[in-house]
Structures are given as C-alpha cells and as structure tokens.
Image: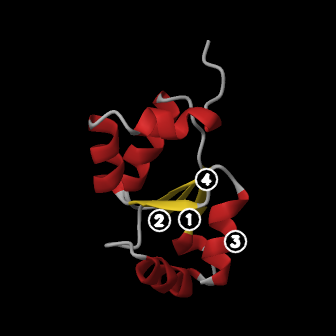
Amino acid sequence: MDKVTRLASEKGVVLFSKSSCCLCYAVTILFQELGVTPTIHEIDQDPEGREMEKALMRLGCNAPVPAIFVGGRLVGSMNEVMSLHLSGGLVPLLKPYQTVLN
C-alpha cells in the first residue's frame, strides 16, 4: 500500500490503469479534454502490480482500475469521476492541475 500511496501523492492527478482497460482510456481522454494530463501508472506493466491492485481495493476502490487520485486523495473509479463531472464538481477539483488551453 505504501507504493500506491506514494505514487498517488507524487503528482496532482494520478490514474492507476491497465493497458487493456477501455474505461481507463476513456477517463484519460476526459481529463485531456478538460486540460489535465494525468500521470498514469499501468499496474499490469509493474512487477508489483498484484500488490498494487490489492492496495487499491483496501483503499476503497470498487474495482482496482481505473483508480483516480486528485491532490493525493482517492476520487474513485470512472463512476465517481463521471458523477462528479455531471454534477459540476470535477472541473473545479481539476482546476489547479489544468494546463493553459489554446
């Protein structure tokens, strides 16, 4: 769990993903469209991936991926991100991490 916690707090927006996960891809595209480039950790490419999956579940993720952290805090999975977005809460949460859009 220490590795997940450390990685989640190193950058503003962190996504734990698997390379074959379509929801992970979709949330990445959503963030990019909102002007945020998340740091992505592909847990299926990490030698400690199994342990990271278990740690994400212990932290409260319903499914191990996608697991989204903003400001070092667990937001949740795609369901939580989309609920936040539809209720108008996602953009303000991401605002400190947005890059200038042309």
Graded by Cα atoms within 10 Å as few (under 14), some (14 to 19) or many (20 or more), the crowding at tag 4 reads some
Q: Are marks 4 and 3 in contact (CB under 8 Å)?
A: no
Q: Return the residue at label 4.
A: 71
Q: Residue 53 or 70: which is nearer the viewer?
A: 70
Element at label 1: strand
Q: Are marks 1 and 2 in contact (CB under 8 Å)?
A: yes
Graded by Cα atoms within 10 Å as few (under 14), some (14 to 19) or many (20 or more), the crowding at tag 3 reads few
Q: How many numbered circles are shown?
A: 4
The amino acid type found where label 4 is placed reads Gly
Q: Residue 58 or 41: which is nearer the viewer?
A: 58
Q: Earlier in the sequence, mark 1 or mark 2?
A: 2
The amino acid type found where label 3 is placed reads Arg
Front of the two marks 4 and 3: 4
Query: In the picture provided, is 45 more to the left or to the right than 24?
Result: right
Quadrant position of the N terminus in the picture: bottom right
**Residue 79 quadrant:** bottom left
Element at label 4: loop
Which residue: 47% across, 77% down?
A: 56
Q: Earlier in the sequence, mark 1 or mark 4?
A: 1
